[in-house]
Image: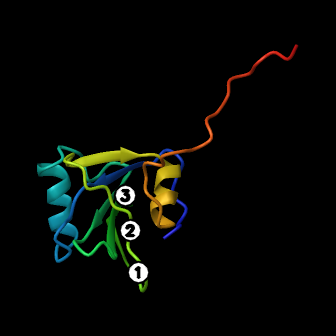
Amino acid sequence: MLIRFPDEIRIYVACGYTDMRKQIDGLAALVQANFQLDPFSKSLFLFCGRKRDRMKVLFWEGDGFLLLYKRLENGTYQWPKTQEDVREITPQQYRWLMEGLAIDQKKMIKTVENKRLL
């Protein structure tokens, strides 16, 4: 699911497992009641089922909700199982998640500030 969304969009992951029978109203209520976030904001809300092979994404488009559903045919998502209810992630972490990688990479190249050469 590598759909292009606006650059200013915020991305939230519902850590742990979500009942995948929930539809738009149930997921929006979960965002509002459990996470104290606004489901009508410019944000993506990602949810994953217990098997970790299905994902739902909730997004408000201004005139209605968009609900995306993806079921992997082979493999599972590396979904965060932490005790946090919801977690904001970066666009890079979103791409990692969609590519089957963990959002917390153990080793990655760090950016370097401008340094003067001798």
Q: Say what secondary structure mark 1 lies in.
A: loop
Name the amino acid type tagged 3: Gly
**Mark 2 and mark 1: Cα distance apart in space:** 8 Å
Residue 72: mark in rendering:
1
Q: Nearer the viewer, residue 16 or 21?
A: 16
Task: Give the residue at x 50% y 58%.
Answer: 96
Is 53 left, or right, of 82 in this rendering?
Answer: right
* Alpha carbon distance from label 3 to label 2: 29 Å
> Would you name the residue on which mark 3 appears?
62
Residue identified by numbered label 2: 77
Residue 61: % across, % down? 39, 60
Q: Secondary structure at mark 2?
A: loop
Q: Position of residue 86 (x, y in %)?
A: 25, 48
Identify the mark nearer the N-term, 2 or 1: 1
Separation (CA) of disc 3 from disc 1: 29 Å
In terms of depth relative to the viewer, which is nearer, 101 or 24? Answer: 101
Q: Most extreme residue toward the left, as rendered?
A: 33
Residue at the spot 25% in from the left edge and 56% down from the top edge: 81
Name the foreground residue: 109 vs 91: 109
Which amino acid type is shown beneath numbered disc 2? Tyr
**Does 110 sit above or below residue 17?**
above
Q: Which amino acid type corresponds to the residue marked 1 in the rendered image?
A: Leu
